[in-house]
Image (cartoon, rainbow, N blue to C red):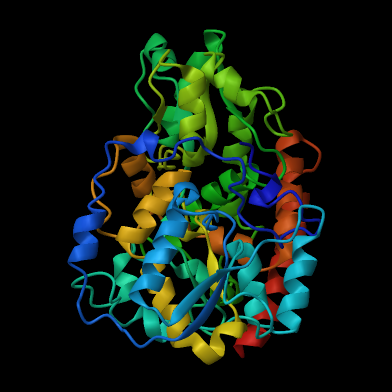
Amino acid sequence: MEYPENMRDDRLDEPGLGRLSRRGMLGLGAAGLAGAAMPLDHALATWNAQLPKSLQGTVTFCAYLYAATQGGAAKENTPARMYNKYMKMHPGVKIEMVPEPPGTQDWTAWFLTRSIANKAPDLLQIGTISGLPYVSKGWMAPITKYLFKPNPYIPGNKRWIDSLPKDFLKPFIGLDGQYYGMAADTSAIWIYYNPDHLEKVDMKAPSTWAEMMQACAKLKSKGITPYTQSGGKGWPISWYFLFAESSLWAPEFPPQTSLDMPGWVKAVKKGLLKKTDARTKEAWQIVKAWYPYWQRGAATGNTKVYNDFADGKVTFLGEGSWEIGTLQGLIKNRFKLSALPLGIPPITRETSKYANGSLQDSGCGALNGIALFVTKHARDHLDLVADFLAYYSSPQVMGPMAFEVGEVPMVKGVGKLPPLIQQAADVAAQPMLLSIPYYSASVKLQTQYDTMAQGYLTGAISLDSALSQLDTLQQQTADDLAKQMHV
C-alpha cells in the first residue's frame, strides 16, 4: 500500500480534510500474529458483573477500517462479531453501521452536509487533522467526563484514559481543553533497514542521527543506495522536518512533551518555535544534509520502493508498521525485516548543539491510529455512545480487531505481542513536540509547510525564504486560534 499524499485519502480534493487511510493495506492480519496471546474468552468471562444492563437506543457508527461485514456468521469479520457481542450484552441497543459514500462521491461534502443537518453518525472515523477544526464549529461532542471514570469493560480500571499510553489521546483535545474522540490502535512511523547491508559496512543499526549519517556515507561509498521512501510532498518529507524541529526545540519544554493545540498557541504567542530562529534553521539544514543519500525520486514519489528494498537495492526504507506484511511477503526470507530500534534515530549533541537526544518520533500514537470523533448527533444519548466506545476500546475487543487488519492495539491488557509489533507499539508511544499542531492548527499552514519543506529539500526555494514565509503564516494562525481561546 502507498500512503496518499499527506497521509490523506486520495479521494479528497481539499487539502487537510481527509482521513488517515488504511485501504488496501497490510496483509498482516491475524495469521501474521499467530504468536500473540489473545485471552478473549477468559477475559469476556471475567468482566465486571455490574456492567450496565439498562442501556437503550441506537449507536450509528461509520468506521471504514472497522466496518462490520454482513451475511451471517460464516462471513462475519472480527468487528461484526465484537459488535454482535455488545448487542447481546445489551439487548436494548442497536449498533448501526453507516456506510461511507460511494467512491465517486466527495467524502468532505458527504460529511459537511450531514454535520450541518445534525445527521452525521454518532461515531465517525476521520483523520485527526479533520476533526479538531470542526470542534470549533460545534459539530463534535466532548467525552472528557467519561474518560476520567472507570471503563466498565476493563476489570480493575480506575480511569478509562489510563488504559492507554500517557498523552495518547492528546490529538483529540480541542482549544477548550476537552477531549472529542478516541483511538485505541495505531501504527508506527519508522525506518526499516536491511541488516545484511549494515554488516557489509561493519555497522549496527544506527541509534543516533550521527550514526545514521555515518552509515549512509559508508553505504554510498560501497555503491549501495542508502535510503528510499514512497511518499513525496507532505508525508513523510514533512515528518522528517517536524522531527528535526521538534528535536532541537525540545530542550525548551518539559521532557516528553507533545504539544496539544492550546499549548502550541501559547508557545508561539510567547515567542517560542519561531521559524526564523537558529534552532529551526539548523533543523532544516540537518534534513537537507541527509538528502544526498536518498534514492532518486524519493522526494517526489517513487512507487517501486518496496520491491527495491526487498530486492536488496537499498538499505533504509522510510515507511510505517502497516507495511510489515507486505514487505515480509516481498522479502521472502532473503534477509530479516527490521526497523531501527527507536523508529527514527534521535538527534544528539554530536549533530547539533541545540539537541539533547530526546525521542521525537510519533507525537502521540493516536495521530497514526484510527481516529473516532464523537459528533454532536450523539449529544442526546451520549451515555450510550460513550459506553459502546468504552467497549470498543477495551483490550478484548480492540486486540482482535486490530490484529485482523494489521494495526497495533495500544490498550493495556491485550497480551504478548510479536517482537516487531511490540517494537511498533513502543515507537508509537514516543512524543513529538510539533506533530499535533502540524496536523490540526490550520490547513493553510500545513499545506504551506509541505510546499516549503519539499521546495527547500530539492533546491527550489532558499532556506531563508521558506522559513520567513512559514513564520509569518504561523504567527497569523496562532493569533487566530488565540482569539478562539480568548487568550
- The relative height of residue 241 versus residue 228 in the rendered view (above or below) is below
Residue at 23% x, 73% y: name it: 157
- The relative height of residue 17 versus residue 322 in the rendered view (above or below) is below
- The relative height of residue 417 versus residue 73 in the rendered view (above or below) is above
Left/right placement of residue 314 relative to residue 354 reads right
Residue 472 visible in the picture = no
Name the spot of residue 177 as percent of width and height, x first.
49, 82
- The relative height of residue 323 versus residue 12 in the rendered view (above or below) is above
Which of these two is toward me, 232 or 469?
Answer: 232
Residue at 36% x, 18% y: name it: 203
Which of these two is toward me, 39 or 179?
Answer: 39
Name the spot of residue 185 as percent of width and height, x first.
43, 56
Residue at 62% x, 79% y: name it: 135
Left/right placement of residue 419 relative to residue 237 reads left
Name the spot of residue 61 as percent of width and height, x first.
56, 69
Name the spot of residue 85 as percent of width and height, x first.
37, 65
Residue 71 visible in the picture = yes
Quadrant where the N terminus sits is top right
Residue at 38% x, 58% y: name it: 398
Which of these two is toward me, 170 or 472?
Answer: 170
Quadrant where the C terminus sits is bottom right
Quarter-wise, where is residue 258 in the image?
Answer: bottom left
Q: How many marks?
A: 0
